[in-house]
Image (tube, rainbow, N blue to C red):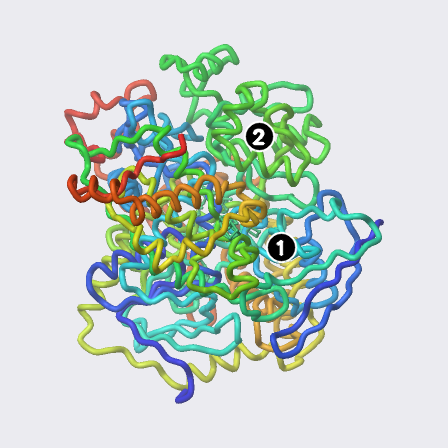
Amino acid sequence: MDDLETHEHDVIVIGAGGAGLRAAIEASTQGVSVGLICKSLLGKAHTVMAEGGVAAALANTDSRDNWQVHFRDTMRGGKMLNNWRMAQIHAQEAPERVNELEEWGALFDRTADGRILQRNFGGHRYPRLAHVGDRTGLEMIRTLQNHGIHQGFEVYMECTVTHLFKDGGRIAGAFAYWRDTGRFVLFRAKAIVLATGGIGKAYTVTSNSWEYTGDGHALAFRTGADLIDMEFVQFHPTGMIWPPSVRGILVTEGVRGEGGVLKNSEGERFMFNYVPEMFQGEYAESEEEAQRWLGGDKSARRPPELLTRDVVSRAIRSENLAGRGSPHGGVYLDIASQQDAEFIKRKLPSMYHQFKQLGDVDITRQPMEIGPTCHYVMGGVRVDAETAHSTVPGLFACGEVAGGMHGANRLGGNSLSDLLVFGRRAGKSAVEYAKSQSSAPEIDADEVAQAEREDLAPFEGRGDENPYALLQDLQKCMETYAGIVRTRADLQQGLEELAGLQQRLARVTVEGTRQYNPGWHYALDLHNMLTVSVAIATAALNREESRGAHSRLDFPDSLPDMEKFNLTLTYRDGQLECRREPRPEMPDELKQLIEVGPGELTADDVAPRFERRRGF
Amino acid sequence: MAEATLKIFRGTAERSEYQTFSVPTYQGMVVLDAVHDIQAGQAPDLAVRWNCKAGKCGSCGAEVNGNPRLLCMTRMDQYPAGQPIVVEPMRRFPLIRDLVCDVSWNYEVNKRIKPLAPKPREADGTYRMQQYDIDRVQEFHKCIECFLCQDVCHVMRDHGKYDFAGPRFMVRLAALAMHPLDTVDRLRDLRDAQGIGYCNITKCCTEVCPESISITDNAIIPLKERVAGEFYDPLAWIWRALRGKKADTRNPVH
Ligand SMILES: Cc1cc2nc3c(=O)[nH]c(=O)nc-3n(C[C@H](O)[C@H](O)[C@H](O)COP(=O)(O)OP(=O)(O)OC[C@H]3O[C@@H](n4cnc5c(N)ncnc54)[C@H](O)[C@@H]3O)c2cc1C
Ligand code: SF4
Ligand code: SF4
Ligand code: FES
């Protein structure tokens, strides 16, 4: 351990997407020493890929909006399983966080009177997403990056964390390797913020990159933290499906927000047939009404293409089962018939470019062929709503790796705002916690040596398993048995196969040296993916109902009793434990917000009950 | 099934060679797909940098048949069948291994640029900006930091002049200079620290930019004009001294 490169900080943030950067900025401004670690280059995290926008009830585009309506939409979109306090804080603080980005240089598209323009998105009652064409994530990450690099925190990039250490019960540090050299490095810290993003690489068809191997989920889990809501994996309804090379790449919901419609092979706008009971009366009932909405008529209701993602993904699946799908198993997304070419190129430039360059499709003239793609994990590290503190002292989590905020289904645009709101809170709380520690935690040298042995094991020629083949098999297993629809038999089969994969993982051998060796990297990532996959399948097996993104063919209904708890997973003495965690009681005034009927909730209605709160 | 041949640069600064691989091709295939297929089947330790595979993150810059390109947006079917496709790392940066090079220099240059300092909000707490006032800056904000323009710029590539910040950062500086909220004057830095004078407007950077940013016409030339105006035009200089203001931040190329 003596010759091991070692760094010491009060707070370490793992992950440099929107959440991690926002956390690091906050922590640094509190005047402690902060280190930010990320496994790709700075500015390349998943956040850069976000397209459609960031949700915040600024009420610029529709003055009827406010945090209460945003809260209500979020809870209903999450099928009531959300941690209500997180959903409340999120809706209240998002406008301030978005405005702050503007102060740091972000330039969102503008309204005619020069304010931030907002666009429609699924499940949001009013146009709510601040955006920059269809590259909002790029604007956000670059803004945070260029602001962040002057806040004094240290950045360690292309550095992958593989182990966390504790001292007694509390967090003590992290073990990582540099991608470029393969050398190891130890980080000592009083507090650690996880901001590692999601798990989507565990599925074959996904909008997620190689980074989304569930590292933070697995690190926290192995350290003893609880995971929550892991049965809920979001399949975005509109991924590219043809040609094969692009399968899974995201087509932003912004296409539908700007008027795009979904059609089956018979040319029918089928979403009118799929409005769930919960949303009856809130969506247009005819194409004529939908058309009026597009034209700006405020008395018209939104088209059903803007239902929540879980609903749209299942509808696409049903259309295909009924024989009305497109040639490659999807449906058509058509904006060419709704908007003129100039508008499409201005508001959706990267979609235009992406289809033209990769799919030989001109979206200003032709429909896009699209289908569901694995996109986001609602489940994550269980945290305290106010502080983002996990169940392990000193370990915090924010962004996609944290669970609770989105319940059974996330609304589009609510992730980017989540990153800002809870990134800031995590950074702040981590500093408070670090300052409260009178002594620096110690790291056990034996544990460090053990971590090093585990990371080097794939070089030891333990068998003939190839990491890439194993990865493919894992993805296929999750896609088949724990995908958009599930059954008990499938999930059991899936868990059995995952156990088999676990054994094969012990025989994985990699070629070459430690220097920038992707085979080795995958071999280590697979541990995390397997841990997370088992967690997903186990939780899915234990929720015997259908709710949000979790659809059980053997239990097709949502059951009122099951609304009363979240599923929590804990790893104890090598065993995975799945518990029903009763949901905390929601205060009456929040309950009322959710219960008021659709047409009734306007700013004026809630004003007497709540102090009006607006972002500036 | 049709096959393609790729000649890929392998190795480190100390030892390197070109290795030839054959891969089956399929509809819509891009060069990054081929590299991934080679990793999975033939060379598991082949190093390549990528993230989004959709032209959004700027990680996968490399040289294909000598041209700087994003591997994930470069279709295989644009190259003549039967001839090997040559894939090499960006030449301008120190090599790490195979197709991956060390681009950390760019991060250092970026850090030396003075950050934005915004003017105060309006009385109602908002910032009012018209869309036409930010169109040009939004063009610059499209930059995905692929560093292909940095790779191709001859000032550094052939002449090794590292006191020039390079086209990527000319774009960033132009975005700051034309940002309606910014209050900082960076013209002296532009001349001295960022060495704008080195650029002789060959436009090679603009040609390779995957985001189609008009780097030279919209960013560099206006900046050069401002620098020239600031330091070499006595009338402009006196005018500013009298009014005590920073140089005009409006976009001059409307
Ligand atoms: C194509 C696409 C479009 C999207 N569009 C939208 C949208 O319009 N609106 C919206 O709200 N949401 C959108 N989302 C979702 C949203 O972008 C993500 O949920 C969000 O960006 C996640 O941010 P994050 O900060 O939690 O993680 P990320 O931005 O993914 O960052 C994770 C960071 O953790 C690091 N990391 C991970 N593991 C390790 C490790 N072991 N060691 C060190 N570092 C590690 C990574 O290097 C990275 O820096 C979209 C997602 C995708 C994929
Ligand atoms: S125009 Fe200037 S910055 Fe661009 S490549 Fe030529 S010399 Fe370099
Ligand atoms: S300006 Fe263009 S070429 Fe240069 S780094 Fe940005 S996106 Fe890449
Ligand atoms: S992988 Fe992101 S630009 Fe190519």
Q: Residue furthest top?
A: A288
Q: Residue furthest bottom?
A: A2
In the image, the residue with mark 2 has its CB under 8 Å from the nearest atom of ligand 1: no
Residue A91: give x, y in percent of width and height. 28, 38
Instruction: Report which residue position mark 1 lands on.
Output: A475
Q: Which mark is residue A315?
A: 2
Identify the residue at horizontal 52%, vertical 78% (top origin): A454
Identify the residue at horizontal 67%, vertical 55% (top origin): B64
What amino acid does circle 2 point to? Ala
Q: Is residue A78 visible?
A: no
Q: Which mark is residue A250?
A: none
Subunit ID for the residue under disc 2 = A
Identify the residue at horizontal 34%, vertical 81% (top origin): A443
The answer to whether the residue labelled 2 contacts the one labelled 1, judged by CB atoms less than 8 Å apart, is: no
What amino acid does circle 1 point to? Gln
Q: Is residue A277 above or below residue A387?
A: above
SS category of the residue bearing label 1: helix
Residue A596: give x, y in percent of width and height. 29, 24
Identify the residue at horizontal 69%, vertical 77% (top origin): A463
- Which of A583/A49 is in front? A49
In the image: residue A9, left or right of residue A349: left
